Amino acid sequence: MEPLAKTVVANRIQALLAVAEGHWGRPFPEPVITYDLRGRTAGQAIFRQNRIRINRVLLENNFDAFIKQTVGHELAHLVCWQLYGPRAKAHGAEWKKVMGVLGLPPLRCHTFDTSKSVARRPLPTFPYACRCRVRQLTSIRHRRMLAKPEYYKCTQCQEALRPAA
Ligand SMILES: [Zn+2]
Ligand SMILES: [Zn+2]
């Protein structure tokens, strides 16, 4: 992940915290940011750890909207927790108020394309055979075999692999 992207996230957090601190006249602790979220969820706020988890694939593929809305959304959860504690519902009136102060629409969900962030389908493989067995080669190895047909030999029978129907 590009260090620049992390800097942009950190700067965005700083700017939003400054707005919150100006509005409520109190400091808010700077959250820890981790980039370990996978799948369809864009971001996640862990209140008790004052931590924001970020889906780096969705960040990289939706950069501007992610920085503006998702980072704001998750930070609003942490600010909300600092202000109201567990009595505020996750996307309730208090959170919506914080979003308003941060100048953001109180949207619950993102509309990012998650096709790149969810587990991928297995890559295509190509069957090759020697005297002793058939095995699946990756497309990289397959292309190498097309260019140079005797490139891979079986380590057991020493026969060159050939395409298996
Ligand atoms: Zn949320
Ligand atoms: Zn063999």
Image: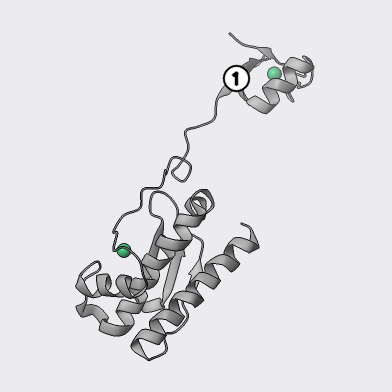
Identify the residue shown where x is 65% and y is 16%: 132
Picture quadrant of ligand 1: bottom left
Q: Is residue 15 above or below residue 160?
A: below
Q: Is residue 122 above or below residue 4?
A: above
Identify the residue shown where x is 47% and y is 80%: 30
Identify the residue shown where x is 43% and y is 65%: 71
Do we see residue 93 in this rendering? yes
Applied colour scheme: one colour
For residue 142, side relative to residue 159 (left or right): left
> Which image quadrant is residue 150 in?
top right
Q: Amino acid at mark 1?
A: Phe
Quadrant of the snapshot with the C terminus: top right
Q: Which residue is identified by label 1?
A: 126
Quadrant of the snapshot with the N terminus: bottom right
Identify the residue shown where x is 63% and y is 63%: 4
Q: Is residue 25 above or below residue 46?
A: below
SS label for mark 1: strand
Q: Position of residue 19 (x, y in %)?
A: 42, 80
The residue positioned farthest toward the top in the image shown: 165
Do we see residue 55 in this rendering? no
Q: Is residue 156 above or below residue 80?
A: above
Q: Position of residue 127 (x, y in %)?
A: 60, 17
Q: How many marks?
A: 1
> Which image quadrant is residue 51 in?
bottom left
Q: Position of residue 89 (x, y in %)?
A: 21, 71
> Which image quadrant is residue 90 in?
bottom left
Q: Camera-side residue: 3 or 68?
A: 68
